[in-house]
Image (spheres, grey):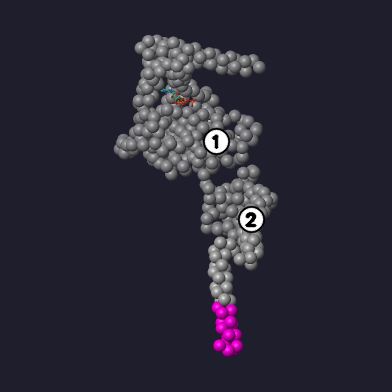
Amino acid sequence: MDDDEVKMKEKDSLDSEENDEDEADSDTDKDSDASEPSPLLTRYNPWKEVAIRAESDRRSIENELIKLQKEIQQLYQELKKLKSPPLIIGEIVDILDDNRVVVKSTTGPNFVVHVANFVDKSKITVGTRVSLNRDSLSVIGILTTSKDPIITEAEVIEKPTIRYKDIGGLEPQIEEIKEVVELPLIKPELFRKVGIDPPTGVLLIGPPGTGKTLLAQAVAHETNATYIRLVGSELVQKYIGEGGRLVRELFALAKEKAPSIIFIDELDAIAARRIDSGTSADREVQRTLMQLLAELDGFDPLKNVRIIGASNRPDVLDPALMRPGRFDRIIDIPLPSHEGRLEILYIHTHNMNLKKDVNLEEIASQTEGMSGAELKAICTEAGMFAIREGHHYVSDHNFQQAIDKIKRGDSITQMKEVGAMFA
Ligand code: ATP
């Protein structure tokens, strides 16, 4: 072998060694790639993480910003509402030709005012409730909610559950109410054939707690009518004309829900005898009464709305209310007699677990002068005493405790009344 050949072989073997080393290197590279990141990557990753976190922070801050901007907007709007002057409520009394109307505002007299251009004039009729600008009193809005909250919150029971059999000791009164309220509602043709008008309104007169409300509910149940109850004192309003409007709306509601029975409790609150009183509050109460009389006068007694009034003070009622065509049938609801009390006790102890020693006859004798409401209270109290003693039944002893308690309560209220008289 010459020198050149030897050099070539040496170069070849060196090359192959280098290749082997390279291959070994690349193997170790692969191994290290799987186990730990390359130094370049380990330097890069923390920054990537920081960038991702910063990006998500940015997004959440942006969201927070949008939320706060919305909140600011809402608060601005709220502030604007709070700063805007109050509007006056009025009612259209007349519509004039020259784009003006006569309004009756709750503040007092009637005014001739303009209607703002943006108000839909086709919706304005006599009786529409509108909002008025405080300075110029021009009409700037129509109030669509025609019914006052008092009227919408009047006790309206579509299907009362009280029946005649739940009322004790009032048989003659039930018969009378059937005749004057029930019959015109279910058989109006009978009256037409005979050619008479049934009484327009029925007035129930009697001490508190004797079952006047029960009677009204029972007659509504038997005639499948809606029962609408409003207490007279709720019709006494602070602002002029408001009470009258409530009466109108009460009758409108009754027509809407017909067949219906309007029950006005504590009628004396608005129908007290008219006196020449100078105070504007008294005049407003009288205006409300006038509106009630007007509604009664325009009432068709054969339509499917019946009206029942109730009062504990017949002595103060305005005689105008009792004229024919108004509350022209008066039904007296007295305190229950011995038999009446017994019936009421039977009704209210019907579901009670009574011990054999309970003698309802005896209890009826002991409770002379008490109303149905007080008898019911005695039954409830007797049950409470039994529970307090840990019994599942009510004994005569419990009834005696209850009678004592109710009588004591009664004498306390009497003492208070006497005290008030001498104060
Ligand atoms: P107020 O004049 O105070 O409104 P009211 O005469 O309308 O009283 P109700 O509300 O009808 O009296 O009666 C109150 C409660 O007393 C009734 O819920 C009922 O439980 C009981 N009650 C009164 N009278 C009778 C009765 N005759 N039969 C059965 N329960 C009665």
Residue in the foreground of this view, choosing between 163 and 259? 163
What residue do we see at 41% from left, 28% from top?
Answer: 215
Query: Residue 345: x and y, percent?
Result: 40, 18
Residue in the foreground of this view, choosing between 222 and 251? 222
Does the rendering let one see residue 161?
A: yes
Q: Earlier in the sequence, mark 1 or mark 2?
A: 2
The residue identified by callout 1 is 235
The residue identified by callout 2 is 64
User: Do the residues under discs 1 and 2 have CB atoms within 8 angstroms?
Assistant: no
**Ligand 1: image quarter:** top left
Residue 286 in the figure: left or right of residue 195: right
Query: Residue 203: x and y, percent?
Result: 45, 29
Query: Residue 294: x and y, percent?
Result: 50, 39
* Span of residues in magenta: 1-16
Query: Residue 303: x and y, percent?
Result: 39, 40
Residue 339 in the figure: left or right of residue 150: left
Q: Is residue 167 above or below residue 110?
A: above
